[in-house]
Amino acid sequence: MAGLAIQPAQAADFPELKRLFDAANDYSLARSGTRTWNAVDMAYKDLQRAVEAGRCHVLRGPSGTIVASICLSDHSSVWGNAGRDGKALYCHKLIKDPASAPPQVGRRMLRFAAEQARANRRSLLRGDTVAVPDGLVKYYTGLGFEVRGATAYQSTGRALILLEADVDVFL
């Protein structure tokens, strides 16, 4: 991944981000029997808002196509009051292209997030993922996140795991 830069997504990237999102969701369905994101229309809207607000970042492959994305925010409603404590940067929509993303791209995107957190005087990265299937929970804990709780998406009632890591894990 040397030489590949993470950069802010642009409005013109949204169709490609939707394609990436759909490919990752289809991959999850084929691999585990369930999609990572069930409320797809709502997820598209969240993704589009993140792009418009400058909170979505992309990694392009050598051909210029987007191979991974991550959205960052200062708060997260699923974390309740802790979601506004000012200690963390929140990672959303960490998506990689299952067909073309280079190895370790998830770790690279999280290192970028940790750099952004550090630059903004945040000591933690926080995120959430679906509880079932548990492959994503295992993925994130394998990278250094710790499970900090569980809740459910208000929109779907789907079980959700809250994850947290010190930024130093990724720097």
Image (spheres, rainbow, N blue to C red):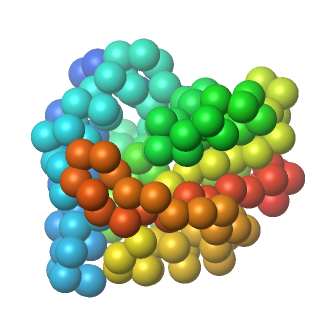
> In this rendering, is residue 77 above or below 48?
below
Q: Position of residue 68 (x, y in %)?
A: 42, 50
Horizontal side of 66 relative to 6 (left or right) equals left
Q: Quadrant of residue 91?
A: top right
Q: Quadrant of residue 114?
A: top right
Q: How many numbered discs?
A: 0
Q: Position of residue 75 (x, y in %)?
A: 57, 31
The residue sitting at 51% across, 73% down in the picture is: 137
The residue sitting at 41% across, 47% down in the picture is: 93
Q: Residue furthest left?
A: 41
Horizontal side of 146 relative to 37 (left or right) equals right
| Quarter of the figure that contains the N terminus | bottom right
Q: Is residue 142 visible?
A: yes
Q: Which of these two is toward me, 1 or 167?
A: 167
Horizontal side of 120 relative to 80 (left or right) equals right
> In this rendering, is residue 112 above or below 162?
above
The residue sitting at 29% across, 62% down in the picture is: 158
The residue sitting at 22% across, 67% down in the picture is: 35
Q: Is residue 2 visible?
A: no
> In this rendering, is residue 108 above or below 25?
above
Q: Position of residue 56 (x, y in %)?
A: 45, 31
Horizontal side of 66 relative to 35 (left or right) equals right
Q: Position of residue 46 (x, y in %)?
A: 30, 32
Q: Which of these two is toward me, 14 or 78?
A: 78
Q: Which of these two is toward me, 39 or 149?
A: 149
